[in-house]
Amino acid sequence: MLLPDNVHPENTLMYNGALIIKTLKRMRAATLLDLFVETRAETDIGMPLFVLSLDWLYLAECITLDDQGMIALCS
């Protein structure tokens, strides 16, 4: 279940994934750490939840990771 009823929305992968996508739209492409810093400027997300959200976005084919370690939105 993606949205359990006993969890606040700001702690879900979907909510934080949306914030990451919003940040990536502004940045175009970023390294993991740069993307984390920029996303954290908007919300108080921890690194474990951030990485889980990135994993979810990657599995959903919303983001890509190139050979140089740059994360970008899929086109």
Image: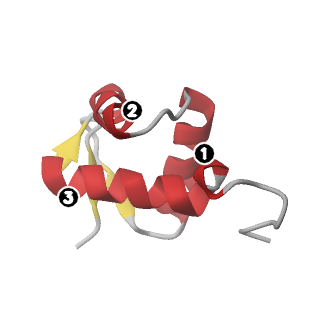
Question: Residue at label 3?
Answer: 25
Question: Residue at label 1?
Answer: 52
* CA neighbours of label 2 inside 10 A, class few (<14), some (14 to 19), many (20+): some
* CA neighbours of label 3 inside 10 A, class few (<14), some (14 to 19), many (20+): few
Q: What's the CA distance linking mark 1 and mark 2?
A: 15 Å
| Extreme residue in the right direction | 6
In the depicted view, which residue is nearer to us: 70 or 11? 11
Location of residue 47 (image quadrant): top right
Give the mark nearest the N terminus, 1 or 2: 2
68 vs 7: above or below: above
Residue 43 shows which numbered tag?
none
| Rendered location of residue 51, percent (x, y) | 54, 39
Disc 3 versus disc 2: nearer the observer: 2
Give the mark nearest the N terminus, 3 or 1: 3
What SS does tag 1 mark? helix
Residue at position x 82%, y 67% in the image: 5
In the depicted view, which residue is nearer to us: 52 or 6? 6
Q: What's the CA distance linking mark 3 and mark 1?
A: 19 Å
Residue contact at pointers 1 and 2, CB within 8 angstroms: no
| Rendered location of residue 34, percent (x, y) | 27, 29
17 vs 69: above or below: below
What SS does tag 2 mark? helix
Give the mark nearest the N terminus, 3 or 2: 3
Residue 40 shows which numbered tag?
2
Residue at position x 56%, y 29% in the image: 46
Can you say which quadrant of the picture contains the N terminus? Answer: bottom right
